[in-house]
Structure formats: C-alpha cells, structure tokens
Amino acid sequence: MRDRGLFRLLVLLSAAGVTAHCLILARYTVDDAFISFRYARNLAAGNGLVFNPGERVEGYTNFLWTVLHALWLRVGGEPELLAKVLGIGSALGSTVLIAALGRLWAHPPTPLAAFGCIFWASAGAVAITAVNGLETQMFTFMVTLGIYLYAGAGGSIRRLAAAVIALALSTLMRPDGWLALAVTLAHYHGGHRRRASLMPLAVAAMVAGPHVLWRLAYYGSLVPNTFGAKTGGGLMQTIKGVEYVKNFVNEYGKAAFFFLAALPLLRWPLDRARSHALVMLAAFFAYVVAAGGDWIPHYRFLVPIMPLIAVALQDGLLTVRASLPRDHGARWIIASAGVWVFIGVITFDIANQTRYLKMHTDMWADGYRHAHRRVGSWLRDHAAPSETVALMDIGIIGYVSGMRVIDITGLTDPHVAAAPGGWLKKEYSLDYLFGRAPEYFVLVSAADYPREAFGSSFPIDGAIFRDPRLLRDYRFLFSEDAYVSRRPHLSGYYLLVFKRKA
C-alpha cells in the first residue's frame, strides 16, 4: 500500500514537472507553426485550406491540427494560445499513459515503476514540442493511446477497435501515423495468422480513408507537397538521419543508458506488448534515419516514440533491480541506493540540457519578434495583399503580412518541391522565380548588407543574391537581425528586404 502511494505521488510530481518544464520554455513558437496558422486562417475566412488563396497546395503535414485551429480562429481565438494549451495538455495525457502502459508491462505500482514518467518529465524534447506551436505532442498522445489500447486488448474486439481508431486518427494529425497504424496492423495479423479478423483493416479504412480520398480530390495528390520538398537528399540525407538519432541517444542518457531499454526486449519469446514496442521502435528509428532528421529543435521526429522508450528504460531498470539481492540487508540497501543514485544522475543530466535549450529558444523567440514580425508588419503596412514576396522563412512573415508568398524552398510551391536535391538544397532555374516577378524578396544573410558583404549558408538565398537580376531589378530597403540578443556576434541571421524597382 505504501509503494502504491509513492508510485502515485511520483506520477503526480512528474505531471507537475512536465507543466513546469513547458512553462519555462513557453516563450518559444517556431516559425513553421505559422504556416499551419495561415492555412487555418484561410480556412476560417472561407478561402479554403490553402496558403495562398486560389493555390491548392498541401504545404502542411497536420490536417487535424490545422482544422482545430481554424475552428478556434472562427470564434475569435488566438492560435498560439490554443497550440500551447493543446500541446501541454497532450504532454500531461502522455504522462498518464506512460504510467498505465508500464502497468500493462507487468510493472507493480512501486516507486521504481514511476521512472518512465520521471524520464518523460525531465526531457527537454517533451517540453519544447509541447509549446512550439506544432502538433507533435497531440500526435504523440494519440499514438501512445493506440499503443496502450492495443497492448491491453487481449481478445477484446472493442479494445482492439479503439486502438485502431486512435492510430487511424493519428494519420490525420501527421503522416507518420500511417507508420504506427501499419506496424500495429501487421503485428496483429502476424500474431493471428489463422484467426485474424479483418475488422481492424475495415475500421482503419473507415476512419483514415475519407481523408485520403479528400486529399486526392482537393490537392490532386496522395501525399503532401512537403514530402517532395523534404526528400531527394540521397545518401547525405540518410547520413544526417543517422547523426540525428546519434545525437538524440547521446543527449538523453548516453548509449550505455539506452542499453537498459534493450534488456527486456532481448528476451524470447516476447509478450504482445513488448514485441509490438520493439517493432514500433525499430520502424520509427528507421523512418527518421531515412527522412534525414529535422532542423526544428528538439528531436520532434523521435518524440512520438519517447513514451515507449521511457517504458522500456523503466522495464530495464526493473529487470536489473530484480537481479539484485532481496534479503533487505546491507547489500540490498546499497544496491537499491545505487539504482536510485543512477536514476538521479541520469535525470539530472537530461534535465540539465534544458538550461541550454532555454538559452537557444529564448534567443529565437527574441529574434522572431525583432526580425520576422517586424518584417512581416512592415510588409503588411507598405505592400498590398495582392503583391508577392519570395522568401524562405514563410511562417511568421507570411502570417503577419498576409501577402501572397513564393516559398523558395518548396514547402508550399510544387515547382520547387519537384526539383532535384534535398531539403534546402533544391536545384532549379532561377528563371522560375524572376519570371514570376515578385514585388519583394526577403533573403537570409549572415552579414548586415550593404555595410558588410552578403553571405548565406542557404544555397538558394546565395544563388538569388548572386543573380545579376536581383540588384538590377530590385533595390535594397533594410535589414533586421534575428540574432539581436546574441550581440556582439561574429555572424548574424539578417533578413534583407528588397523591393522591385518601379
């Protein structure tokens, strides 16, 4: 009874830790979130689910998230507020599911069985993805709910159907949901070869199928335009994906710590819950490697499987604990103390990363306010909504200005997305951009042009600046530095605004 009370207290403290962790980082909203907000605003205004009115391009990957924000905007709500409330609420919901999933893995409600929740609460990736304005945490909750329901389904058709519904709904939140759904359906049919029911397939088709048909009819494609924009990098993309996973493992406990998660998954035969978890983890890690990772802090592509990692780590600790002396003598006390010291050191190491994460995200929060919002506001006040601006950072500037946008990296532009090359390295003729004659260009430079020579780490920005048509047909207006809070600095992140000459 005492152990059960301590377990519940630790889960409750973990939930409080998640909330506090989120609030520490709450200033930050990533630029990409405003892409979804602009789609939502256009939908709420009756312009359709589009970025530019009249252009049906699926430049988002979070249909359900965007629709929820459209409904919120329709009643006068502020999208950033809803995004953070849903994100934090989903992170708290996943905390409860981690505790519940641990129980299904035959963990008694002891203090050590709350480690999964402690790990989840201490991870900066959890907090930042809850407040950055994107759908990651709500998607994670839906996937984890599906995994939990499936693990406990046993022979219950109703619970199995509920698991499939949760995972099928996750496909409306992010395309990665198809991976979780496919893994679960394959695991079910692989384990029930002689008496597998077709019901899960039918339920999945009824829930997820209509969105696929609508996407094909509305956008003319089975996959989002972002798929083309972010793929095509070949071997270099895979190498980046490996680096992404390696950095994640190193940051969240070091490789030796993750070995604990493998301990209970090395037993054979595995039960239903553990075998499903093993296949799900392998599938998501392979997918992230193939996708090349992501630029947005902080490991958002791996956050959806962090609840499973948390439970697997907890299972590994309990496996080690079960091998320790049980005589409650001096050896038992020393061994138990050693386990908890180990937990404390690892948790501190993970949570300590938040100090650096806060410095980084606060810098970008200041930069977005100083540079992106200023540029967006200037364009809103000085340009006509019908005029066009070509740029890379289309989120905040596009949302605040309300102008028609040409995305020079292809998220919302099919021509650029179809070009060869990987993400941010698409190779296409600049005749396409200059031929559309945008009234404005916003380019990213590491130097404050014209006082300093233009320099950019983004190939397309550099190519546009070097093209003689830019300085011949456009005049430089002003610059704003997103690294304003890092001054003095060796290089900045300057947004340079150019206007077409009359």
Image: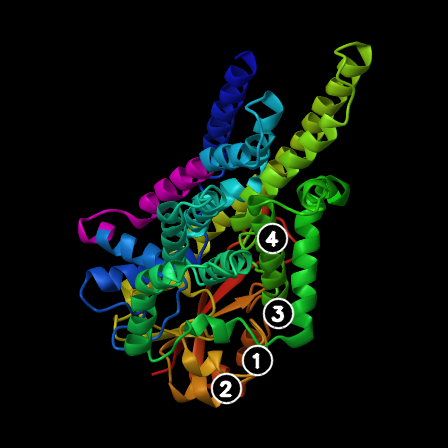
Q: Cβ–Cβ below 8 Å for labels 1 and 3?
A: no
Vertical relation: 402 (above or below) 90: below
Predominant SS along the magenta part: helix
Q: Cβ–Cβ below 8 Å for labels 1 and 2?
A: yes
Residue 44 visible, this angle: yes
Which numbered tag is attached to residue 463?
Answer: 1
Question: Magenta stretch: residue 75 in it?
Answer: yes
Q: Which one is earlier in the sequence, the residue at label 3 or at label 2?
A: 2
Q: Which residue is mark 3?
A: 455
**Residue 415 rendering spot, x and y as whole percentages:** 44, 83
> Dot 1: what SS?
helix
Vertical relation: 110 (above or below) 374: above
CA distance separating discs 4 and 3: 41 Å
Q: Which one is earlier in the sequence, the residue at label 1 or at label 2?
A: 2
Q: Which residue is mark 4?
A: 281
> Dot 2: what SS?
loop
CA distance separating discs 2 and 4: 42 Å
Mark 3 vs mark 2, foreground winner is: 2
Magenta residues, as a range? 72-94
Q: Which residue is mark 2?
A: 430
Vertical relation: 413 (above or below) 484: below
Q: Which one is earlier in the sequence, the residue at label 4 or at label 3?
A: 4
> Dot 4: what SS?
helix
Q: Residues within 10 Å of mark 4 (few under 14, many from 20)?
A: many
